[in-house]
Image: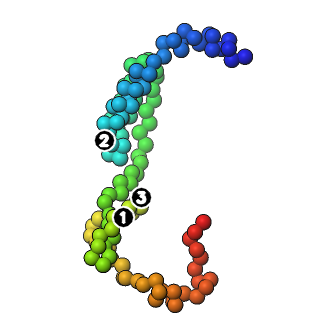
Amino acid sequence: MTAPLLGSLAPLLDDVTLDAPWALIERFSTLKREHPNDVRTAAREIVQRLEAFGVPVTVHEPEIYLSLPGKASVLGGGTSFRAKPLAMSRGPEGAHRAPRLRADRLRSQYRPGDHQSRRG
């Protein structure tokens, strides 16, 4: 049953090329998706390209909160280890410190059943 449908769409499908979508991909490859101004630029590009093809466009501009975790590290024993901050984590106002703990000493402080495993 799909053959007649495809047959009727043949003239339309013959006009389809990948030129416009590929040009958009190439443009997007120059933008950093985590930078708000680049996100706005990308949205404008999509709108302009759709309108150029005569496609009606409605743009919604919601207020969003974008988390941009930056560089983080953990310092231990004089060695700096690269870390990945969680989204929406505290900003870099200053170093945050935690007491040094040794696993062999911690084990004696906990009894079985005092905590649940985080493994899923």
Q: Label 3 crowding class (10 Å Cα cut-off): few <14, some 14-19, many 20+?
A: few
Q: 106 or 64, which lies in front?
A: 106
Residue type, label 3: Ala
- Crowding at dot 1, Cα within 10 Å, few <14 / some 14-19 / many 20+, comes out as few
Sort mark 2 into few (<14), some (14-19) or many (20+) by Cα contacts within 10 Å.
few
- Kindly report which numbered mark, 2 or 1, lies closer to the viewer in this rendering: 1
**Alpha carbon distance from label 2 to label 1:** 27 Å
On the image, numbered disc 2 is attached to which residue? 37
Horizontal side of residue 63 vs 3, given as left or right: left
Image quarter where the C terminus lies is: bottom right
**For the residue labelled by badge 3, is the local secondary structure a helix, a strand or a loop?**
loop
Q: Position of residue 107 (x, y in %)?
A: 51, 86
Relative image position of residue 12 (x, y in whole percent): 53, 12
Residue type of the residue flagged with mark 1: Ala
Q: Which mark is residue 87?
A: 3
Residue at disc 2, secondary structure:
helix
Residue 119, given in percent of the width and then of the height, sits at 58, 69
Residue type of the residue flagged with mark 2? Asn
Q: Residue at x 42, y 26 (%)?
A: 21
On the rendered structure, is 106 left or right of 117? Answer: left
Report the residue at 53% width, 14% height from top. Answer: 13
Q: Reply above or below: 67 against 53.
A: below
Q: Is residue 36 visible?
A: no
Image vertical order of residue 113 relative to residue 74, above or below: below
Q: CA distance from mark 2 to mark 3?
A: 20 Å
Dot 2 and dot 1 residues touching (CB under 8 Å): no
Farthest residue toward the right?
Answer: 1
| Residue receiving disc 1 | 83
Expressed as whole percent of the image width and height from the top left, the position of residue 1 reads 72, 16
Seen at 59% across and 12% down, the residue is: 9
Query: Height in image: 31 above or below 78?
Result: above
